Amino acid sequence: MLAIYKREIKAYFTTMIGYVFVAVSLFLIGLGFFAYNLYQERPYFSYTIQGCTLVLLVTIPFLTMNLLVREKKAKTEQMLLSSSASVASIAVGKFLAAFSVFLIPCVISCVYPLILNRFGTVPIAEAYVAILGFVFYGAACIAIGMFFSSIVKYQVLAAILSFIVLFLGYIMASIISLFTATEGLISNILGVYDLSTPLNYMTNGVIDFVAIFYYVSMTALFIFLTAQSIQKRRCTVTAKNFFKCEFNIIGIIVAIAIFVTANIFVKKIPDRYSTVDCSYSGLFSISAETKDYIEGLEEDVTIYVLNSREGYDEYVRKLLDKYEEESEHIKVEYIDQYLYPRFYLQYTDTAPEAGSLIIIGSKNTKIVGYSYLYEYDYSNYYQTGSVEISGFVGENQINNAIDYVTNGNLAKVYVVTGHGETEFETAYYDAITVSGAEYENVKLDDVDGISGKISGIIINGATKDISESDLAKLTDYLDNGGKILITLAHTEEDTPNLDELLDYMEINVVTGMVIENDPNYYYQECVYLIPDMITNKYTEDLPEYPLLTEAVGMMVNDYSEYVSYDSFLYTTEDAFLKVNYKESTIFNEHEGDYEGRFVVGVDASRQITDEKGIVTNPEMIAIASSNAFSTAMDAMVNNTNILLFANIVGTFVEESSVTNVSAKALSLQFLEVGRTDRNVIVIITMLLIPLGVIACGIYTCMKRKKN
């Protein structure tokens, strides 16, 4: 085998084939590296690897087409077949030679993630897992190409057949998706030759031993088939050696059967034993909190997925698999909507979106919409009109739904209407849902009282006064330990009842608009405040400072004997309150305006002990601007305002029996690659290195020709 290996390596590098393959591979990897990582400044080298899998469909047939065809062309086939080398050593030696050539660009590409790391945060582990998967994928492709080189007489025909078969394996997942659940047998048969799906999991940063086993067994099968093809040439079907050739045919059938059976068996191994999640955000793992929670389940839960399994979202599918693995009480079933379009009518009259989850327990049923499994970035909405998916919150949503259907626990938030409030946009309602609560737009006049089961109340910029009965209901709710988020708006009329509600926490509103004079603390105009921020439970994970506009004057009693204040958003001392703001076009300070540092975000709480000695802790979070919670503000501060809102609402449900699981980021910050650095790297990776390899090949061939 070693002699065959050395002979083939020499053949690759005394001709231009090896050099051209390496140079072209490095150029194409460099092209993907430039397009995805340097030009678009994306930190994921796995994108480049995914793009190169399609390239292999062309480069691998070029690399393997001569492996055995060349022997016929050079008339050395008879010598090879009559040598003492076994057919297995011939096949393995030739495979290893081609694989060694393939490894050269793969090894060089390992440097590229390290280059990217200079320009920002790069998921290094994901990159190397993707390269590892690419290596195993390439090995299988080489074995397939070598087999076709062994059964035809012409190298071009070998290349064409290899390309067709490899391309079929590349698109097999798409072909399988055309079949419905009732045609599962066909899907399972075709799935045996699905080359791309196992690699997809690894390019997402998961070391998948099932995928590795698949590629290794595929490689071994086609090396075996190549060896049988070589053996076929050694013997002629005559009476003397008929049984030997028949044994080979039987051996091929047995080998294919072993390959199929082994892979079907290995695929049934649970992910917790067969995978290692190396993804940056742990996308394909469930948190320790979730494991503890679902391991403690004592009631059965059924999760119906309104989609076929084959065509379903990979993130959610893998997550649901882990839920089933971790608890014997959780069962997941996929309902193909083409076969059962009216299945949802058993649980709701309104058709859920495709991919939604219907979660059923002993006490309740909960529908989790597919879109609520993700977090969204609205920062570019006003520039591009598009919304990007930024995070995965499926784990948190499923946990809260399971808790609801088994225990009846689901936090509920009232969004007060009927007083000229600023209506929330969809993104903010989604944030309430993602926090693990359901919301209801409610007019307080329509409810008899506010139940203690209401986790929180939101009053977003009321411009008209609340009624006395509304005030009584809200005050009673606070007396029982309730939580209220209130944003303040400029009004045209007196609001004594609303003022009295604020006075419950000794918060006073002063007529006027807050103007910031320090240019470091406003955005473009002095009414767009970028307040100083104190770290607390609402602000600790904010990526930037929030943005408030047209803030109302808000005062708190720092010397209160009853109320505790956690003021987390302030103006600077250069700010002032413009009293006559309605008649001013230029916001300069005049006589009668108030100077000082203003609170524009505060968490006020107090402790109340009733006659029975029961202690409650009502809480009111007040924000001085009703415009704060809008996608227009988010677009200017990288979604900071909606994150602040989500953090506040998250405290409404923090007493749930389910621990909140943070969103898992689907994307990292873009890299910051300077033009000079980009140009230098492109010149080296796409020009100098590939041309250097070609130059070495030309020099070697000319020297060989001369000798």
Image: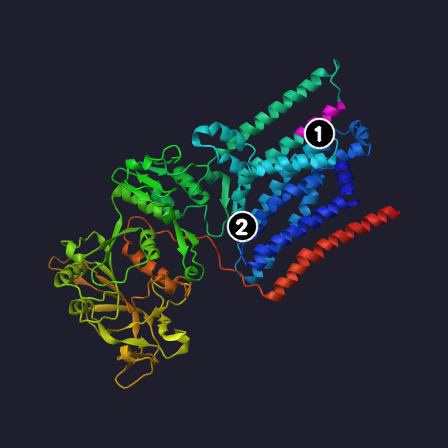
SS majority, magenta: helix
Choose between 211 and 189: the one closer to the eye. 189
| Mark 2 vs mark 1: in front | 1
Q: On residue 151, which mark appears?
A: 1
Q: CA distance from mark 2 to mark 1?
A: 38 Å
Q: Residue at x 28, y 35 (%)?
A: 346
The image position of residue 555, as x and y in percent, is 25, 74
| Kind of residue indicated by mark 2 | Glu
Q: Residue at x 58, y 36 (%)?
A: 169
Element under disc 2 = helix
The reply to whether callout 2 and callout 1 are in contact (CB within 8 Å) is no
Q: Is residue 403 left or right of residue 309?
A: left
The image position of residue 415, as x and y in percent, is 25, 57
Q: Which residue is mark 2?
A: 126
Q: How many marks?
A: 2
User: Is 553 colored magenta in this rendering?
Assistant: no
User: Is 232 colored magenta in this rendering?
Assistant: yes
Q: Which residues are magenta?
A: 225-234
Q: Residue at x 80, y 50 (%)?
A: 698
Query: Is any atom of residue 92 visible in this view?
Result: no
The image position of residue 204, as x and y in percent, is 51, 47
Q: Is residue 247 left or right of residue 377?
A: right
The image position of residue 51, as x and y in percent, is 58, 48
Q: Which class describes the residues within 10 Å of circle 1: few (<14), some (14-19), or many (20+)?
A: some
